[in-house]
Image (cartoon, coloured by chain):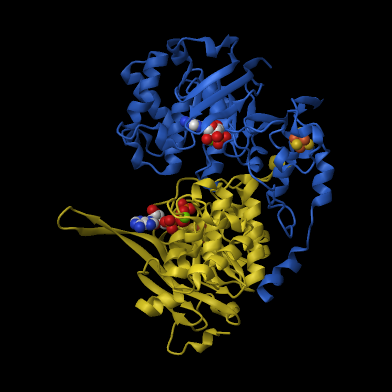
Chain colours: A yellow, B blue
C-alpha cells in the first residue's frame, strides 16, 4: 500500500497539506491543488485569449482505497471537470494527481495509457455515451480490443461474463443500444467500465438521467460491484440523499473549490460551512409534516460566473453570514477542524 | 371551494412509425380554485402530455386527443375554436416548462416576450406593458430589472431564465398555473428560491397551481393534493397527508421505499422497483403495473382496475390496495449509521 510519505521530493506533501493527516494509510488517489482553466478565445483569424473559465480552481483531496468519496455541488461548480482532469481526459492547468504515488500529470504516451487502464468513468447520459451503430458485444469488448487484452472467442466470453455481472442477460450480446431502456444502457456502460478490471471509477451523475424507479437498481448494482471487486469510487451527484446513501466521505464544491469535506455522518449531522448548511436545508423530505416544520435557509442570488469569481471568499455574494473579511480578505483555506472534518470558512474555528 | 378545472377520461395518442403510442389513457381529475395539485410520475408516464392536452398544445400530427372532456370554468376546452383557445392560453391558464430555452425565443429581447402577451390579452399600451414587464421582473427577483429587461435570454443564467418564464407565466394573473418540472434542471438552492417565489405569488394572486414533477419528496412541501401517474393513468389520488402516511397503491409504496431520506437512519440497501415502465405501443392488458408489482394476483393480468375511493379524498386503482404504511415499516432495514461508516473503508 502506498503511503503519502513515500513521495520524496514532493514538498507539497507536508503536514499543512489539507488532506494528508487522515488519508495517509490507505490513499489510492491524491489530488493536490488541481486547477483546470479553460481559455476564452476571441477573433476568427488571429485568436487571442480574453479570459478564462476557472472551472476547477485549486482542489485538494484524497480518496482511500475501497471507499466512495461523494462529490456534490451545484451545476457548473466543476464536479465533472474535476473528474475528467483526474483521469487526464483534460490535462490540468496546474496541480498534481497522484495515483498510487505516480503523478499522472507528468505522464505521457504509453505510460499514461497503462495507468488509464486502471481508471474508468461512467457518464451521466447513458444515451449519449453508447455508439448506436455498435452491438453490445462490441461496446463492452472495445476496451479489451484497444488495450489488446482479449479478442475473438475469449473476448466474447468475457463480455458475457460482464453482462451477467451487471444483471443483463448474456444473450443481449448482439443487440444494439436503442433496444434497451435507460437503466439497461447504464448497465451496459458499467459493464464496459469494468472490462479491464479497474481499481478506480469516476461515476459522474450515473443515475441522474434515469427514472426514479430505476435509480435504486443502479445504486444497488454499483454498491454490489464495489464489494465484489474492491472498487474505489468518486461518486459525483447533485442529489444529496443518494450521496449520503452511497458515500463513506463527502466533499462539497462551490465555484471551482472544495468548501467542506468530512465523513458522511459528520457532514450530514454537523455541516459547518454556510453553503453546505443551505444545501442540506434545501433537500426535500418526503413527509409533509416534516416539511411544514422545517426551517429552510434560502440563499439569495445566482451562482456567480466562474470567469470572474468573487474576490475573497467566493461564496460571499450569497452567504448569509458574510463579513468584511470575507469580502476583502484572503480566500479562506480548506483546513482540518478536527477528526478529518475540513472546512474553508473564516467563521469556523 | 369552487371547481376550476375538471378533466374527464382524457385520451391522447401519437401515431408513429413504431405504432400507436398510448400516452394518456383516460385519467379523470379536478383542480379547485387556489389549490396546488401535484402530479408525480416517471418519465413517459403522461404528465406533460396530459397538461399539453388540457392546453390544446399537442402537435397534430403525430398527436391527437382521441377522447375525454376538459371543463375549465364550465366550458369544454376541447370544443373551442383555436381563436377562442388562444384567449384562454397565457391569460387564464399559463404554463411554465421544464427547459426555459425551448419556450423563450432566443432572438427576441426579454422585454418584447413579456409585453407581447400583456398587449394581446390585457390591451395595454406599449409603454404600460414595458413598465409592467419591469415590475414583473422585479417581483421574481431579477436584480437591476430596468436594465436587464432588454437583455436576450442567453444573457441570463439558468435560474434567471426560469424566473423570466415565471414572470411571463404570471404576467396576466392566470387562474391556473401549470408548472411542468420548472425546477428539475436547477440546483436545490435555486429550486428553493423558485418555490418560495411561486408560493408567495400564489398567496398574492390566489391562483391554482398544477405542479408536475418526478420527485415525490419535493411535492411533500408544496402540494395540497397529489396524483400519482403511471402508464398514462392515475394510480392513486390523495391529500398530501394521506399519500405519504397511508399510501395504498403498490407503485406509490415502491416509489416511497426506493428514495433514500435525509432525515432517516441510513438503510443498508435501497429497495428498487424491479423491472421497467410499460411499453406504450404494446400497452399491457390488465393493470399497467402488474409486471413489476409485488402484490400481483391473477385478476391483475386481465382486468384493469379503476380508481376506487378508500376514504375521504383518497382513491386507488388497484385490486389489492395493500396497507402501505405497515409495509413501509416492516421492510425498512435500518442500521446504525456509525457502524456502517467504517465498514467499507476498512474492508
Ligand atoms: N470545454 C470547456 N470549455 C469551456 N468551459 C467549460 C468546458 N467544460 C466545462 N466548462 C465550464 O466549466 C464549469 C464547470 O463545468 P462542469 O461540467 O465541471 O460542471 P458540473 O459541476 O459538472 O455541472 P453539471 O452538474 O451541470 O454537470 C462550467 O462553468 C462550464 O461551463
Ligand atoms: N411528439 C411525440 N411523438 C411521439 N410520442 C410522443 C411525443 N411526445 C410524447 N410522446 C410520448 O408520450 C408519452 C408520455 O410523454 P410525456 O407526457 O412527455 O411524459 P412525462 O411524464 O415525462 O412528461 C411518452 O411515451 C412519450 O415518448
Ligand atoms: S468565509 Fe465568510 S462568506 Fe465565506 S462562507 Fe465563511 S462566512 Fe460565508
Ligand atoms: S392491480 Fe394488481 S398488479 Fe396492479 S398494482 Fe394492484 S396488485 Fe399490483
Ligand atoms: Mg456535470
Ligand atoms: Mg415531461
Up the image or down, B24 lies above or below B259; here it is: above
Identify which residue, A30 or B44, lies in the foreground. B44
Identify which residue, A316 or B129, lies in the foreground. B129
Q: In this view, does B258 lie to the left or right of A48?
A: right
- Residue at horizontal 57%, vertical 11%? B76
Up the image or down, A71 lies above or below B233; here it is: below
Q: Is residue A78 left or right of residue B267?
A: left
Quadrant housing residue A28: bottom right
Up the image or down, B105 lies above or below B331; here it is: above
Q: Residue furthest front?
A: A153
- Residue at horizontal 79%, vertical 58%? B334
Q: How many tags in the picture?
A: 0
Identify which residue, A17 or B248, lies in the foreground. B248
Horizontal and vertical percent for residue A253?
50, 60
Q: In this view, does B290 lie to the left or right of B94?
A: right
Up the image or down, A152 lies above or below B144; here it is: below
- Residue at horizontal 70%, vertical 54%? B270
Identify which residue, A54 or B9, lies in the foreground. B9
Q: Quadrant of the N terminus of chain A?
A: bottom right
Residue A309 at least partly seen: no
Q: In which quarter of the image is the C terminus of chain A?
A: bottom right
Horizontal and vertical percent for residue A309?
38, 57
Residue B334 at least partly seen: yes
Quadrant housing residue B248: top right
Quadrant housing residue B122: top left
Q: Is residue A41 left or right of residue B45?
A: left
Horizontal and vertical percent for residue B140?
47, 34
Q: Residue furthest left?
A: A45
Horizontal and vertical percent for residue A257?
46, 63
Amino acid at each position: 500500500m502506498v503511503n503519502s510519505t513515500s513521495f520524496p521530493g514532493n514538498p507539497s506533501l507536508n503536514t499543512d497539506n489539507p488532506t494528508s493527516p487522515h488519508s495517509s494509510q490507505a490513499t489510492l488517489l491524491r489530488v493536490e491543488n488541481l486547477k483546470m482553466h479553460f481559455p476564452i478565445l476571441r477573433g476568427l483569424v488571429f485568436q487571442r485569449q480574453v479570459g478564462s473559465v476557472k472551472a476547477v480552481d485549486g482542489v485538494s483531496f484524497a480518496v482511500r482505497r475501497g471507499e466512495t468519496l461523494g462529490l456534490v455541488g451545484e451545476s457548473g461548480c466543476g464536479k465533472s471537470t474535476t473528474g475528467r482532469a483526474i483521469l487526464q481526459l483534460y490535462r490540468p492547468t496546474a496541480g498534481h494527481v497522484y495515483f498510487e504515488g505516480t503523478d499522472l500529470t507528468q505522464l505521457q504516451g504509453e505510460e499514461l495509457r497503462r495507468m488509464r487502464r486502471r481508471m474508468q468513468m461512467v457518464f451521466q447520459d447513458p444515451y449519449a455515451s453508447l455508439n448506436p451503430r455498435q452491438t453490445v458485444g462490441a461496446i463492452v469488448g472495445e476496451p479489451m480490443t484497444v488495450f489488446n487484452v482479449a479478442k475473438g472467442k475469449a473476448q466474447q466470453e468475457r463480455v458475457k461474463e460482464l453482462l451477467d455481472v451487471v444483471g443483463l442477460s448474456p444473450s443481449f450480446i448482439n443487440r444494439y443500444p436503442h433496444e434497451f431502456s435507460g437503466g439497461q444502457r447504464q448497465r451496459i456502460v458499467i459493464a464496459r467500465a469494468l472490462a479491464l478490471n479497474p481499481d478506480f471509477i469516476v461515476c459522474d451523475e450515473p443515475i441522474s438521467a434515469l427514472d426514479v424507479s430505476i435509480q435504486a437498481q443502479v445504486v444497488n448494482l454499483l454498491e454490489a460491484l464495489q464489494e465484489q471487486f474492491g472498487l474505489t469510487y468518486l461518486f459525483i451527484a447533485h442529489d444529496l440523499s443518494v450521496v449520503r446513501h452511497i458515500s463513506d466521505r463527502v466533499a462539497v464544491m462551490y465555484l471551482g473549490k472544495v468548501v467542506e469535506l468530512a465523513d458522511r455522518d459528520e457532514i450530514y449531522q454537523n455541516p459547518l460551512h454556510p453553503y453546505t448548511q443551505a444545501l442540506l436545508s434545501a433537500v426535500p423530505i418526503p413527509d409533509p409534516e416534516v416539511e411544514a416544520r422545517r426551517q429552510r435557509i434560502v440563499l439569495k442570488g445566482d451562482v456567480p460566473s466562474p470567469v470572474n469569481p468573487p474576490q475573497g471568499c467566493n461564496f460571499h455574494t450569497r452567504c448569509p453570514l458574510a463579513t468584511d473579511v470575507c469580502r476583502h480578505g484572503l480566500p479562506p483555506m480548506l483546513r482540518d477542524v478536527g477528526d478529518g472534518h475540513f472546512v474553508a470558512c473564516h467563521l469556523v474555528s | 371551494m369552487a371547481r376550476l378545472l375538471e378533466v374527464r377520461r382524457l385520451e391522447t395518442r401519437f401515431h408513429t412509425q413504431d405504432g400507436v403510442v398510448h400516452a394518456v389513457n383516460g385519467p379523470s381529475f379536478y383542480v379547485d380554485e387556489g389549490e396546488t395539485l401535484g402530479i408525480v410520475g416517471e418519465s413517459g408516464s403522461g404528465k406533460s402530455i396530459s397538461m399539453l392536452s388540457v392546453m390544446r398544445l399537442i402537435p397534430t400530427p403525430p398527436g391527437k386527443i382521441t377522447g375525454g372532456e376538459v371543463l375549465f370554468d364550465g366550458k369544454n376546452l376541447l370544443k373551442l375554436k383555436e381563436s377562442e383557445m388562444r384567449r384562454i392560453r397565457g391569460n387564464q391558464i399559463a404554463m411554465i416548462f421544464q427547459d426555459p430555452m425551448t419556450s423563450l425565443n432566443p432572438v427576441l429581447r426579454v422585454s418584447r416576450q413579456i409585453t407581447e402577451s400583456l398587449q394581446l390579452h390585457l390591451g395595454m399600451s406599449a409603454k404600460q406593458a414595458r413598465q409592467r414587464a419591469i415590475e414583473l421582473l422585479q417581483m421574481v427577483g431579477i436584480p437591476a430589472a430596468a436594465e436587464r429587461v432588454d437583455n436576450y435570454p442567453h444573457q441570463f443564467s439558468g435560474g434567471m431564465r426560469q424566473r423570466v418564464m415565471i414572470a411571463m407565466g404570471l404576467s396576466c394573473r392566470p387562474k391556473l398555473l401549470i408548472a411542468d418540472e420548472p425546477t428539475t434542471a436547477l440546483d436545490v438552492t435555486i429550486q428553493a428560491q423558485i418555490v418560495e417565489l411561486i408560493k408567495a405569488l400564489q398567496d398574492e394572486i390566489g391562483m391554482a397551481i398544477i405542479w408536475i414533477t418526478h420527485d415525490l419528496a419535493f411535492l411533500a412541501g408544496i402540494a395540497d393534493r397529489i396524483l400519482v401517474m403511471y402508464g398514462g393513468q392515475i394510480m392513486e389520488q390523495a391529500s398530501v397527508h394521506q399519500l405519504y402516511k397511508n399510501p395504498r397503491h403498490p407503485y406509490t409504496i415502491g416509489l416511497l421505499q426506493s428514495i433514500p431520506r435525509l432525515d432517516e437512519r441510513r438503510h443498508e440497501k435501497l429497495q428498487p422497483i424491479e423491472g421497467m415502465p410499460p411499453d406504450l405501443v404494446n400497452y399491457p392488458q390488465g393493470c399497467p403495473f402488474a409486471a413489476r408489482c409485488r402484490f400481483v394476483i391473477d385478476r391483475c393480468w386481465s382486468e384493469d382496475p379503476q380508481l376506487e375511493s378508500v376514504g375521504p379524498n383518497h382513491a386507488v386503482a388497484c385490486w389489492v390496495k395493500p396497507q402501505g404504511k405497515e409495509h413501509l415499516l416492516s421492510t425498512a432495514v435500518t442500521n446504525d449509521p456509525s457502524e456502517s461508516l467504517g465498514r467499507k473503508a476498512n474492508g
